[in-house]
Image (cartoon, rainbow, N blue to C red):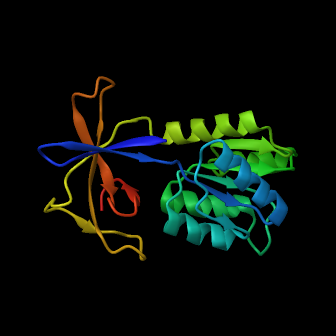
Amino acid sequence: MTKIYINYGNHISILMVLKKVLIVEDEGLVALALEEILKRIGYEVPGIAETGEEAIAMAGRLNPDVILMDINLKGEMDGIVAAEKIHSAYDVPIIFLTAYTDDDIITRAINAGTSGYLVKPVNVKEMFANIELAINNRRRDRTRVFQPASDPEGIPCRNPECGAMMVRAYAPIRPEGRVMSSIGWICPQCKHTILGDK
């Protein structure tokens, strides 16, 4: 669970949010088994994609904290190409989950900017460690402070299904957390985040 702090001026609210893991796997039984394991070890699974195209669309719509991506997928796009497109559009960490261990595939995965590489069958402890490392490497600042929803600089949420106003997100720039810097935007309603400027 991630703690998110929202500063309302006279008080601070703390939201406890389950970490979201999007599964990209074209084998139905494998996907369902992964979903069950992830839920059992404390993650939310907002969706399962079977193709690279579905993965790209779902990454934008669901705003996952991390993606478990099979390399060999249905359709014209493999998992590595889908990962490259997701990285460039959404900056979501991706852990490849595959039966392939040949050097060419591993090199392509590394060049795609992978956050991890797991070989099937998956060890649950290794999967958990890879997920936590990927999320924490992306969010080195564990505490985030947000301005109230009445922030005059608010922008419309980029999630097409939401429509609420996003507020500025802040994080400590020093470990002691005394100095804060703007890191992007968050929607208090759907939790969609944007790192960086508008």
Measuring 57% from the left and 72% from the top, which residue is drawn there?
Answer: 57
Q: Nearer the viewer, residue 79 or 62?
A: 62
Measuring 76% from the left and 59% from the top, which residue is drawn there?
Answer: 32
Residue that lies at the very extreme toward the top in this rendered image? 176
How many numbered callouts?
Answer: 0
In the picture provided, is 3 more to the left or to the right than 87?
left
Q: Position of residue 69 (x, y in %)?
A: 70, 56
In the picture provided, is 45 more to the left or to the right than 167?
right
Q: Is residue 149 visible?
A: yes
Name above or below for residue 154 compared with residue 130: below
Residue that lies at the very extreme toward the front in this rendered image? 40
Name above or below for residue 160 compared with residue 194: below
Q: Position of residue 89 (x, y in %)?
A: 50, 63
Q: Position of residue 140 (x, y in %)?
A: 44, 35
Measuring 86% from the left and 50% from the top, which residue is drawn there?
Answer: 100
Q: Nearer the viewer, residue 76 or 16?
A: 16
Q: Position of residue 49 (x, y in %)?
A: 68, 67
Q: Is residue 108 visible?
A: no
Residue 188 falls in image quadrant: bottom left
In the picture provided, is 17 more to the left or to the right than 109?
left
Measuring 71% from the left and 40% from the top, which residue is drawn there?
Answer: 127
Q: Nearer the viewer, residue 90 or 193?
A: 193
Task: Give the quarter of the figure containing the C terminus.
Answer: bottom left
